[in-house]
Image (cartoon, grey):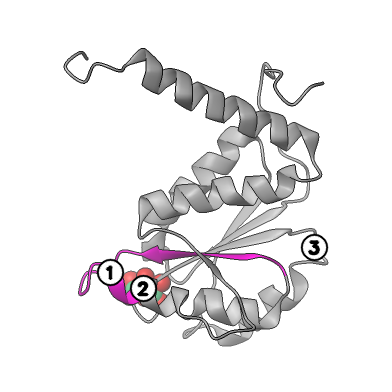
Amino acid sequence: MSDHSTPSEPAPPAAAPRVGIVMGSRSDWETMQQAAARLDALGIGHEVQVVSAHRTPDLLFRYAEQAHARGIRAIIAGAGGAAHLPGMLAAKTALPVLGVPVQSKALNGLDSLLSIVQMPAGVPVATFAIGAAGAANAALFAASILALDDARVREALDAFRRRQTDDVLAHADPRQA
Ligand code: RP5
């Protein structure tokens, strides 16, 4: 099948999750569900778990150490405020860590963004936009990583991009509903 063919349905999720979505608190789910929804739409198996850098540090270390062996190929980590979760995960695993700054109440997520993006050289975290757009894009980026050696994911991603473009072109006049 070519890169530009249109699959009739998204690929069914693989049995073992390939993307881990973690977040510092249950309160982050409203944002992080955007990532899960995108992966669902692309048929990419994923898992979701609260893992707090501050409240469950031992779990964070276990999660990071075991993720690759369990088949995880990218970790999307959302956190707000003093958002240490993505950076600490990246310190404990060589898997790609995709950081999503959750919009905090006190500082609107600027604290989260700076906490996640300002990593010291040697321990990279790919940092996305604050809030829902960042969560959605982190999922699409994780899909791009998987698509490098998974044709079904590549086809699902290509189809999504085509639909998105077609939708904009079909509704080019903003005065029309
Ligand atoms: C961070 O603190 C979490 O990622 C969350 O964004 C923020 C607030 O957590 P809760 O007090 O709502 O549990 O660790």
Label 2 element class: helix
Image region (quadrant) for ligand 1:
bottom left
The residue indicated by pointer 2 is 112
**Pointer 2 residue Cβ closer than 8 Å to ligand 1:** yes
Q: Where residue 113 sits: x, y (%)?
A: 37, 71
Precedes in sequence: disc 2 or disc 1: 1
User: Which quadrant would residue 120 be assigned to in this image?
Assistant: bottom right
**Residue 119 colored in magenta in the image:** no
The residue indicated by pointer 3 is 70
Q: Where residue 78 sits: x, y (%)?
A: 47, 65
Would residue 163 be found to the left or right of residue 132 on screen?
right
Q: Write down the region rendered in magenta.
A: 95-111
Distance (Cα) linking label 3 and label 1: 32 Å
The residue indicated by pointer 1 is 104
**Pointer 1 residue Cβ closer than 8 Å to ligand 1:** yes
Discs 2, 1 touching: Cβ within 8 Å: yes
Can residue 11 be seen?
no
**Pointer 3 residue Cβ closer than 8 Å to ligand 1:** no
Foreground residue among 44 and 48: 44
Label 1 element class: loop
Q: Where residue 29 sits: x, y (%)?
A: 42, 57
